[in-house]
Image: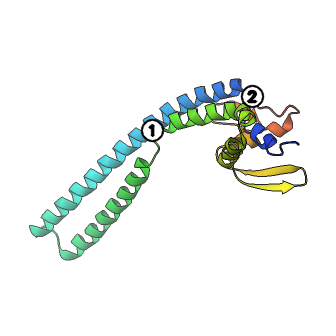
């Protein structure tokens, strides 16, 4: 009996040369991203500190009767709104996965060995692999069409041009169902 799910696993198994290329570019991208995120986080922290200091000075000015109530309320609302916005931006900036590169490398290495692992696994192991790569399968006569999970959906579709200046052409354009680089 033929394994109707094997093809869905083979479609997300990447060749070693592509995995090596992706890991190399992921490392470069990760370094750039981490540097940009550190800069952004530091900038947001400085802006938050400035807005907090301005609010404190505004309160002092009001207590010292240097500004009237109307001006005070307008500026207070403006600064509190800015602080709320900055706090929200800080929270989202801090949510960035610090293990982005390591997680990406693990995923790429897994995708490199998925098909051989699948073929050598028992039924329970195969079920785990199938569940990990797809959220749903539609069975049509003798084939299974998966709804791939991220990032396996990208691996199955094939990659397109990236910011690294190279393109990976979609798999379905080539008869042997592999990824190819093009300039």
Badge 2 is on which residue?
Answer: 181
User: Residue drawn at (70%, 47%), measured in percent from left and top?
Assistant: 127
Q: Which residue is mark 1?
A: 36
Q: Residue at x 17, y 59 (%)?
A: 57
Q: Is residue 176 above or below residue 74?
A: above
Q: What crowding class fits label 1: few (fewer than 14 Cα within 10 Å), some (14-19), or many (20 or more)?
A: few
Q: Residue at x 79, y 45 (%)?
A: 5
The Cα–Cα distance between marks 1 and 2, rounded to whole angstroms, is: 28 Å
Of residues 60 and 125, the one nearer the viewer is 125
> Secondary structure beneath disc 2?
strand
**Position above or below: 163 against 68:** above
| Residue lying at 69% horizontally and 25% vertically, measured from the top left | 16
How far across and down, in percent of the image, does residue 8 sit?
Answer: 78, 43
Residue 72 lies in quadrant: bottom left
Residue 164 - label:
none
Q: Position of residue 132 (x, y in %)?
A: 65, 46
Q: Is residue 16 left or right of residue 105?
A: right
Give the mark nearer the N terminus: 1 vs 2.
1
- In the displayed structure, 79 sits above or below 149; it is below
Find residue 71 and report its image quarter.
bottom left
């Amino acid at each position: 009996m033929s394994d109707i799910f094997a093809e869905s696993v083979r479609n997300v198994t990447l060749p070693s040369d592509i995995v090596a290329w992706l890991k190399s570019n992921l490392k470069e991208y990760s370094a750039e991203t981490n540097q940009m995120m550190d800069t952004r986080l530091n900038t947001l922290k400085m802006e938050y500190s400035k807005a907090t200091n301005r609010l404190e000075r505004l309160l002092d000015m009001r207590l010292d009767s240097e500004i009237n109530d109307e001006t005070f309320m307008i500026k207070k609302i403006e600064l509190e709104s800015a602080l709320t916005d900055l706090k929200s931006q800080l929270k989202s900036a801090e949510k960035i996965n610090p293990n982005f590169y390591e997680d990406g490398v693990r995923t790429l290495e897994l995708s490199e060995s998925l098909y051989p692992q699948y073929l050598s696994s028992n039924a329970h192991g195969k079920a785990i692999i199938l569940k990990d790569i797809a959220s749903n399968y539609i069975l049509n006569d003798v084939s299974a069409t998966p709804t791939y999970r991220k990032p396996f959906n990208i691996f199955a579709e094939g990659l397109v041009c990236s910011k690294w200046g190279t393109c990976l052409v979609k798999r379905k354009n080539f008869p042997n169902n592999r990824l190819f680089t093009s300039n």
